Image (spheres, grey):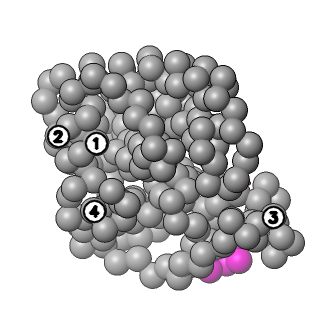
Amino acid sequence: MKLYTVPLAPNPMRVTLYIAEREALGCEFDIERIVVNTLKGRHREPEHLARNPWGTLPVLELDSGQFITESLVIIDYLEGAVSGPGLLPEQAEHRALSRNLERIIELRIAQDMGQYVHCQKSPLGLPQDLPKAQALAQRMQLGFDYIETLLQDGRQFLEGPSPGVSDCTLGAFLQFMRFSETDLIGERKALREWDQSYRERDAVKSLFMV
Ligand SMILES: N[C@@H](CCC(=O)N[C@@H](CS)C(=O)NCC(=O)O)C(=O)O
């Protein structure tokens, strides 16, 4: 397998975090990682568009030559294809709740955060748009409130006592937020503690820039 990726970008980062979490559990990933330099626009060149017509990252190339172009589907594939302990719960109800939380984070925080950072301080050099950034920041507040409420029972990770895919998604997008040198967490104490303790863990700390 080959994973086409780029440092810092949040969707590749969530896959990177997922792999690191499972490696920490003893799983072995036979994956070649290939960086596609988005700063140089390589993701818009024919070589990458042949892998993924939308030009986005990450992309997983399977040994069969097929491509998976959605980060969450890459994670789902790896969960089944790589043996050893996984991050997704086995039991149907727990698995559904895990996926539900991951989707809430994606749809209520992550998608807006991706746009927010590009409006605030784009790593790709896109023009700043502060009014739009402010509107996006406002919209994310409900998502952050939801997470803050969830953490009130003292759980260490978003889905309970061990890391899940939700932690990978939120961790990746809060990392991207830090790139914009802004902080949207505000006075949410539990979320701030989760953020700090999640990225300071041995399994993932080398992947975070601060
Ligand atoms: N839904 C896709 C989104 C992928 C995506 O938007 N990736 C960003 C990096 S985080 C990208 O490649 N952006 C470059 C572009 O759209 O030109 C996924 O989850 O993988």
Q: Amino acid at mark 1?
A: Asp
Q: Position of residue 110 (x, y in %)?
A: 52, 37
Mark 1 sits on what residue?
Answer: 195
Quadrant containing the N terminus is bottom right
Q: Which residue is mark 3?
A: 44
Instruction: For marks 4 and 1, give the CA distance.
Output: 12 Å
Task: Give the residue displayed 76% in from the left and 66% down from the top.
Answer: 41
Task: Decide which of 95, 73 is in the foreground and name it.
Answer: 73
Question: Label 3, label 1: how many angstroms apart (C-alpha)?
Answer: 33 Å
Span colored in magenta: 62-66
Q: Is mark 3 within 8 Å of ligand 1?
A: yes
Left or right placement of residue 12 versus residue 172 in this view: right
Q: Does the image show residue 165?
A: no
Q: CA distance from mark 4 to mark 3?
A: 31 Å
Give the residue type at disc 4: Lys
**How far, Cα to Cα, is label 3 from label 2?**
40 Å
Q: Which residue is mark 4?
A: 205
Crowd tier of the residue under label 2, counting other residues whose Cα lies within 10 Å: few below 14, some 14–19, many 20 or above: some
Could you tell me residue 65's position as x and y percent?
Answer: 71, 77
